[in-house]
């Protein structure tokens, strides 16, 4: 079954490279005060944030690995492609500013990429760009010669004040560990989508589960709380939960030269995620801490910074911040529940 | 015929994501004065160039489109992936500083990507990074789930002083057009490689043709002359020749609101390229101006800037700078030869 001819929009090929660039340029006019030269020249030229350090990151979404067209619209993909990069900048205590947006469009893909698809992708990108005050500075479009997944690649430049940077390595034994939002929510959402892959247009009846699905499709990067935790020096270290809580705790502890204890009872699990994992016969805590794609932030907070933490939490605009454990002198990474200790289960690996 | 087992190196999969990141981090230690936080955290943190504007660009090399493993080694691919971005920064009058390097590694490709391939790619990248004083700040590695081309994607951040920026749009009627190096050289080199695809290990006997092949595999971006032409304000506009001279002349003229006349006799063609195009039965001038992959620079130079141009040319370290025509009030884009005019042939389109 093909779409009726009158409903089709031009393909990328029909529009041509300059047509595509013009379309993007019209959608994202360059704010002259920030971008004296925006989209369409050999490179963009931008005004720096005075006296600040630059924060640089890049991340790709690859079809079939990071998204599935059955589960995510192009609008979701455009949103998430920027969101995951904003999350990385926030995890450094930084504020995002300028993005470069690149596509690799397959010559032979699951279906021809049309201008309508590009429009939808740009809608999602524009939505989060507006939320996080990011300007699109430029990008690149490549077509492949043969079969390939669709790829969206974003590079993001932000800023952070000197001495306000949050690395993974700044933690000390005794620092409390805090996490924003909930843990395992996106993994439950993805689980539901996979279980309903045969009939992808259905939505969960359960409003909580619908929230898990939405969290998977469109993660809300914790841009504001990341910047505030850095600026106020409430945190000594931070990392985002792109690869799951267990991975983040392990990496912060290893980089800081400490161990960590996580208190299972304290973990903020979404009730619908718990129900979903139980229905699937999985132990909810293990599934939640191993699950990737939660773009929450993990912070190490020194004891002396408790007042600053309260202040920072007051600027979190309703994003909950939960104490889930602490960094320890002992180098092991431990999950404590019912008075007993077990190794914190890893889970998510990229390849 | 497969490589003997003892000669194989670990695959990407065997090394794992952290193994690959550690390998890259060891190869590219972060210079602390520039990169307080380098490879391996959520994002890199860099010291800005004081009082300068930022220059931002990104470009990908896609296997089967921008390179062919029969024609280019991974070392060439690593070199070229950064070179094409340096060329874009130079075309703005900027100086490159910091790169983000990303890979998309196919799960199913022309053959398994091994650590040796990564090492070679990093060798080429390191070579041009050292030549152009670019520090590697970070990057990303994604694997695909199915068949895909290998992709290298680089984002590059540089700097330029305010009021020294060279856009495409700054030219005026009467400005002379100058080009660095030679034109059509890379196209001739690629032509030779394609004609010998059945036996790719052969090299051209003709030393000139070998130079054309080398120019295709490893373009020398004109980093120094670009920055000098901007800094001295010898040029009013600039663009690189990634998509060929005809494309660059057209784009500079259109963006500047002028036309252009190119003098065929003045075009700096490589003698071996001329011989190659003639052997192939192609008209050398037409083939040369339409051929892509020359990472030379096109400059518009106002009459009053001739003294500055001489000064800038003195800093070009032997890179020739040739006057090839001028921007005109009349909006047509014309090639003039033997006293007659013809439209400047376009040629290279991306998709």
Image: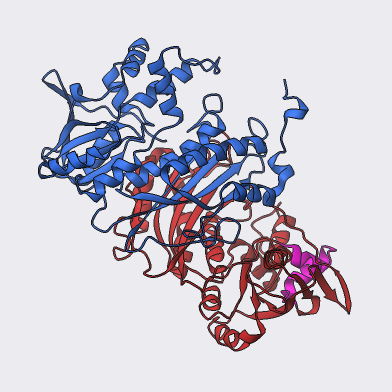
Chain colours: A blue, B red
- Count the labels in the image: 0
Q: Nearer the viewer, residue A255 or B194?
A: A255
Residue under the image location 41 percent in, 33 percent down = A219
For residue B26, side relative to residue A210 (left or right): left
Residue under the image location 62 percent in, 35 percent down = A117
The answer to whether one can see residue A196 in this image is yes
**In the image, is residue B277 part of the stretch drawn in magenta?**
yes
The range drawn in magenta is B267-291
- Residue A305 vertical position relative to residue B82 in the rendered view, above or below: above
The percent coordinates of residue B205 (x first, y second) are 69, 69
For residue A219, side relative to residue B3 (left or right): left
Residue under the image location 56 percent in, 49 percent down = A28
Q: Residue furthest bottom?
A: B307
- Residue A17 vertical position relative to residue A323 in the rendered view, above or below: below
Q: Nearer the viewer, residue B62 or A15?
A: A15
**In the image, is residue B261 part of the stretch drawn in magenta?**
no
Q: Quadrant of the N terminus of chain B?
A: top right
Q: Nearer the viewer, residue B225 or B268?
A: B225
The percent coordinates of residue A286 (x first, y second) are 28, 22
For residue A271, side relative to residue B234 (left or right): left
What secondary structure prevails in the magenta region?
helix
């Amino acid at each position: 079954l093909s779409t009726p001819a009158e409903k089709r929009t031009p393909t990328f090929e029909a529009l041509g490279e300059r047509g595509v660039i013009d379309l993007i340029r019209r959608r994202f006019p360059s704010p002259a005060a920030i971008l004296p030269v925006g989209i369409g020249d050999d490179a963009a030229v931008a005004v720096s944030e005075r006296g600040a350090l630059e924060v640089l990151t890049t991340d790709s979404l690859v079809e079939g690995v990071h998204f599935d067209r059955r589960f995510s619209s192009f609008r979701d993909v455009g949103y998430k492609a920027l969101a995951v990069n904003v999350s990385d900048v926030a995890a450094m205590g930084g504020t995002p500013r300028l993005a470069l947006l690149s596509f690799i469009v397959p010559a032979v893909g699951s279906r021809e990429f049309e201008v309508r698809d590009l429009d939808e992708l740009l809608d999602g990108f524009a939505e989060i760009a507006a939320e996080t005050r990011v300007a699109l500075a430029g990008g690149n479009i490549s077509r492949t010669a043969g079969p390939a997944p669709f790829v969206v690649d974003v590079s993001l430049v932000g800023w952070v004040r000197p001495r306000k940077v949050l690395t993974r390595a700044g933690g000390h034994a005794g620092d409390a560990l805090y996490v924003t939002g909930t843990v395992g929510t996106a993994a439950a959402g993805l689980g539901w989508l996979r279980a309903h892959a045969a009939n992808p247009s259905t939505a969960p009846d359960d409003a909580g589960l619908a929230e898990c699905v939405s969290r998977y499709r469109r993660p809300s990067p914790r841009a504001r709380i990341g910047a505030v935790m850095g600026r106020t020096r409430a945190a000594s270290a931070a990392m985002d939960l792109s690869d799951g809580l267990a991975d983040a705790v392990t990496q912060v502890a290893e980089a800081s030269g400490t161990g960590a204890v996580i208190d299972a009872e304290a973990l903020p699990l979404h009730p619908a995620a718990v129900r979903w994992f139980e229905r699937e016969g999985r132990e909810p805590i293990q599934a939640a801490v191993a699950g990737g794609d939660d773009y929450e932030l993990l912070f190490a907070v020194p004891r002396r910074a408790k007042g600053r933490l309260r202040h920072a939490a007051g600027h979190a605009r309703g994003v909950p911040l939960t104490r889930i454990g602490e960094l320890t002198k002992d180098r092991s990474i431990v999950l404590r529940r019912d008075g007993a200790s077990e190794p914190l289960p890893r889970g998510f690996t990229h390849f």
